Image (cartoon, rainbow, N blue to C red):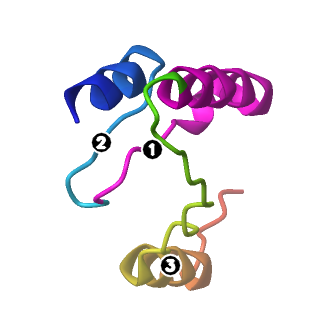
């Protein structure tokens, strides 16, 4: 629905195609997110649209980055005298 999409975009939501959902960046902080969500919910309710919220999944750690940092931690260190 174009009206809902516009309301979400105006309030800072993003729609990454890989996620398949509108997401609100964490950079707004909790208080900023709460205000934006409340405003969106009120505007969408005026159009007869309900709002469902859920927490996003935590980011998956890249196993290659973890392995690389572990290898760097084990690498011998040369000390100068």
Q: How crowded is mark 1: few (under 14 residues within 10 Å), some or many (20 or more)?
A: some
Q: Residues within 10 Å of mark 2 (few under 14, many from 20)?
A: some
Q: Which residue bears the numbered disc 2?
A: 15
Nearer to me, 54 or 31? 54
- Any mark on residue 23, and which? 1
Which SS type dominates the magenta stretch? helix
- Classify mark 2: helix, strand or loop: loop
Mark closest to the chain's N terminus, 2 or 1: 2
Instruction: Tell me residue 44's x, y (percent).
Output: 48, 28
**Residue 23 magenta-highlighted:** yes
Work out which residue is located at the far top of the displayed protein and give it: 10
- Classify mark 1: helix, strand or loop: loop
Instruction: Tell me residue 22's x, y (percent).
Output: 39, 44
Q: Which residue bears the numbered disc 3?
A: 66
Mark closest to the chain's N terminus, 2 or 3: 2
- Any mark on residue 11, and which? none
**Pointers 2 and 1 in contact (C-beta within 8 Å):** yes
- Magenta residues, start to end: 20-45
- State the residue at coordinates (23%, 36%): 1
State the CA–CA distance, disc 1 to disc 3: 27 Å
Above or below, 57 relative to 63 = above
Judge from the rendering whether residue 4 lies leftward or rightward of residue 28; answer left or right. left
State the CA–CA distance, disc 2 to disc 3: 29 Å
């Amino acid at each position: 629905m174009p009206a809902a999409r516009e309301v979400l975009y105006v309030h800072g939501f993003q729609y990454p195609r890989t996620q398949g959902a509108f997401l609100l960046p964490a950079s707004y902080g909790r208080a900023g997110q709460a205000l934006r969500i409340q405003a969106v919910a009120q505007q969408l309710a005026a159009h007869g649209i309900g709002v469902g919220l859920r927490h996003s999944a935590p980011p998956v750690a890249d196993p290659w980055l973890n392995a690389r940092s572990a290898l760097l931690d084990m690498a011998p260190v040369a000390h100068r005298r």
